[in-house]
Image: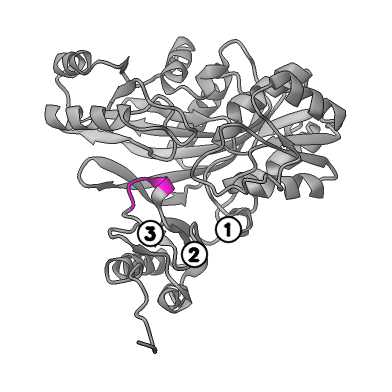
Amino acid sequence: MTGPRTVAVVDADGIGAHLPGALRREGLGCVVVRSDTPSASFAHDRSEAGADVVHTGDLSATAAALRGLGVDFVVAGTESGVLLADALSAALGTPGHGMSVPTARRDKYAMARAVAAAGLATADSLVTGSLPELREWVRRRGEWPVVLKPRASAGTDQVHFCHDEQQVATAFAAVVAATDHYGTRNTTVLAQRYLRGDEYFVNTVSRDGAHHVVEVWRYHKALIAGTVPMYDYEEPVPADDPGVRRVAAYALAVLDALEIRNGSAHTEVMLTAEGPVLVECGARPGGAHTPEVVSRCLGTNQIDLLARVIARPGELADGTLPRYRIGTPLRYVSLISQVDGVAPDAARLAPVRALRSFVELVLTAPEGSPVRPTVDLNSSPGYVYLSAPDPAQIEADYRRLRELERTGLYAAPVPTGGH
């Protein structure tokens, strides 16, 4: 079984920015495609100098350009590239995902319906553009809290936990007044049953319908302003953990239900008292992790394995891909600002870098640029990796990091000299 020669990556942003280099290390050519709906969460060079092909809405023209460049495989680098990557794969006739209901890989309601049709557990849901209809659904269910979000939310964008009807009305108004990170106005709201349990994510790679679990992590979230969930920190969980085995088996069944056959996926699952239930699934690499740090602690990472199964599909088929194993404990901590401030300079970051378990810091905004109060993952100032043999050291440093954030990490520098 041989792999392709040239791979197109649609919207190589976030963690997807590492993918072209990984593909080239596997000896593959790489073409970067810029979609016409890139995420507003990433800074883009408007000259598009970093893209080999810019999609302007004409699928046939873009497919022809890729055909001329010898592209014989297409993948999404991040969420904004999912639908275009699918459409281009279908147009080129290259290995891709099933196309019976491609919207189910972006639209959370269609996703839940497809997963439920496969006989898998999903959260009770409603899609509506009517507040009275939403209120009736909430009253009929008589269960609090309820979750409200856009049908195509990403990174906790406009996700609300509502504990009463007033919060429902406020959240409904906020969602339908907003535009998502891909430039589309929200005209409806997705309401869902609140799931209680431990939330995990399962990162996978797939080739020709076969799947490989790269890693499983557990989320820990915090509520902002009482109703908005925000990623606090996340940690990898051993592959032999009983909960991980259940969650991973469910996640692979979700991939089949959504016809995710060639590429990568990031599947979020709540392990409830009744069993695993889908939160959502993205047909692209997961999150904003730094591949090198993940490999250092787990022995492998999703980006490198994605490039590997594209180049050498037989390794997935014969089961020779590496399995993850937690070496030194690792924690990924999302930075959270509670104030209007600025991205910190080196002096303010010095106490962060001095933490005994500090591994790496990534800021999403240049030093001195404005920082707003964090309301979702996309407004987080960045993230920090903490790792140490003793989990107690990681916990102590995590608490110290949060204290630094509360006591001036994002404050504007005090001017010195001059008048």
Q: Residue furthest front?
A: 419
- Amino acid type for the residue under numbered disc 1: Cys
Residue 188: x percent and y percent? 34, 20
User: Measuring 41% from the left and 76% from the top, which residue is drawn there?
Assistant: 348
Quadrant (top left/top right/bottom left/bottom right) for the N terminus? top right
Residue 393: x percent and y percent? 40, 69
Could you say which quadrant of the image residue 268 lies in?
A: top left
| Element assignment for label 3 | strand
- Amino acid type for the residue under numbered disc 2: Ser
Q: Between residues 151 and 318, which one lies in front from this camera angle?
A: 151
Q: Which residue is mark 2?
A: 387
Left or right? Give the position of 418 relative to 229. Answer: right
How crowded is the residue under tag 3: few (<14 C-alpha within 10 Å), some, or many (20+)? many
How crowded is the residue under tag 1: few (<14 C-alpha within 10 Å), some, or many (20+)? some
Q: Between residues 36 and 293, which one lies in front from this camera angle?
A: 36
Q: Which residue is mark 1?
A: 297
The residues colored magenta run: 374-378
Query: Which colour assignment does the render follow?
Result: one colour
Tell whether label 1 touches label 2 (CB within 8 Å).
Answer: yes
Work out whether residue 128 can be spotted.
yes
Q: Which residue is mark 3?
A: 371
Sequence-wise, the earlier of marks 2 and 3 is 3
Left or right? Give the position of 72 relative to 406. Answer: right
Q: Between residues 246 and 227, which one lies in front from this camera angle?
A: 227
Left or right? Give the position of 195 relative to 204. Answer: left
Q: CA distance from mark 2 to mark 1?
A: 8 Å
**Is 237 drawn above or below residue 269 in the view shown?**
below
